[in-house]
Amino acid sequence: MQLALEKFAELEVIEVCENGLQAVKAVNELKPQLLFLDIQMPKLDGFDVLELLGDQAPFVIFVTAYDEYAVQAFKANAVDYLMKPLDPERLEQTVQKIIQRIATEHPAPTSEWISKSVRENELLQRILVRDGSDVHVLAVNSVCYIESADDYVAIQTEDATHIKLDRLNKLEEKLNPPQFCRIHRSYILNINYLSRIEAETKDSKLAILTNGKVLPISRSGYGLLKKLL
């Protein structure tokens, strides 16, 4: 890919990354105008990279082995793409088009269309948390519970708390229902970490976790929880 781009005098390759983690760090530090992004990469895939970059993502050209049917979602959202193996004529067309756009436009926000159009029916297998220049990749099975904090969520694992800019309702839609239960308007519980349920008062219950943490259970949450246990 790097060799193919060297013939374009308008482009300067400022960094080549071997995986998604390097790509996130490079974009944050170097602030490129254009990113050629492979979808299938080690550690983080192309969609993970864009999720972590959020609205800081530059213009993006996907480089993918997916067939044309699969990439219609990219085209519909004004994101260009190149198929593997690269076709020199197609590359020329794509580069000239994106150069014109860079001169007159700003990159469109990516966060919404990634989740809606590309991963609409996928359940989360991991949760990505950006912490400055660091990226934490949390396996969902390691998450004990998630707590709402206005526009953020606090994701609690056995040994750490991770703060992520996200809504509890949005995360709930992507978590496996038999494993994760909305026990309270402010809490989602991984039932694998539930030790027991205790009565606080006649009408309220408490979830006692395996690590000793105590979470409130609402009336509706208790009803949902009973169906899973």
Image (spheres, rainbow, N blue to C red):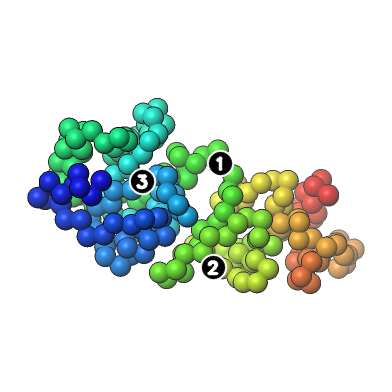
Which corner quadrant of the image does residue 209 belong to? bottom right
**SS for callout 1:** loop
The residue closer to the viewer here, 192 or 202, is 192
**SS for callout 2:** strand
**SS for callout 3:** strand
The residue closer to the viewer here, 40 or 131, is 40
Quick check: marks 2 and 3 in contact, CB under 8 Å? no
Q: Which residue is mark 3?
A: 38
Q: Which residue is mark 2?
A: 163
Three-letter amino acid code at the position of disc 3: Asp
Residue farthest to the top, as pictured: 69
Three-letter amino acid code at the position of disc 2: Ile
Mark positioned earlier in the residue sequence (2 or 3)? 3
Is 50 located above or below residue 211 in the figure? above
Three-letter amino acid code at the position of disc 1: Glu
Q: Residue at x 68, y 68 (%)?
A: 158
Is 10 located above or below residue 197 in the figure? above
Q: Which residue is mark 1?
A: 122
Quick check: marks 1 and 3 in contact, CB under 8 Å? no
Mark positioned earlier in the residue sequence (1 or 3)? 3
Crowding at dot 2, Cα within 10 Å, few <14 / some 14-19 / many 20+, comes out as some
Residue farthest to the front, as pictured: 3
Crowding at dot 3, Cα within 10 Å, few <14 / some 14-19 / many 20+, comes out as many
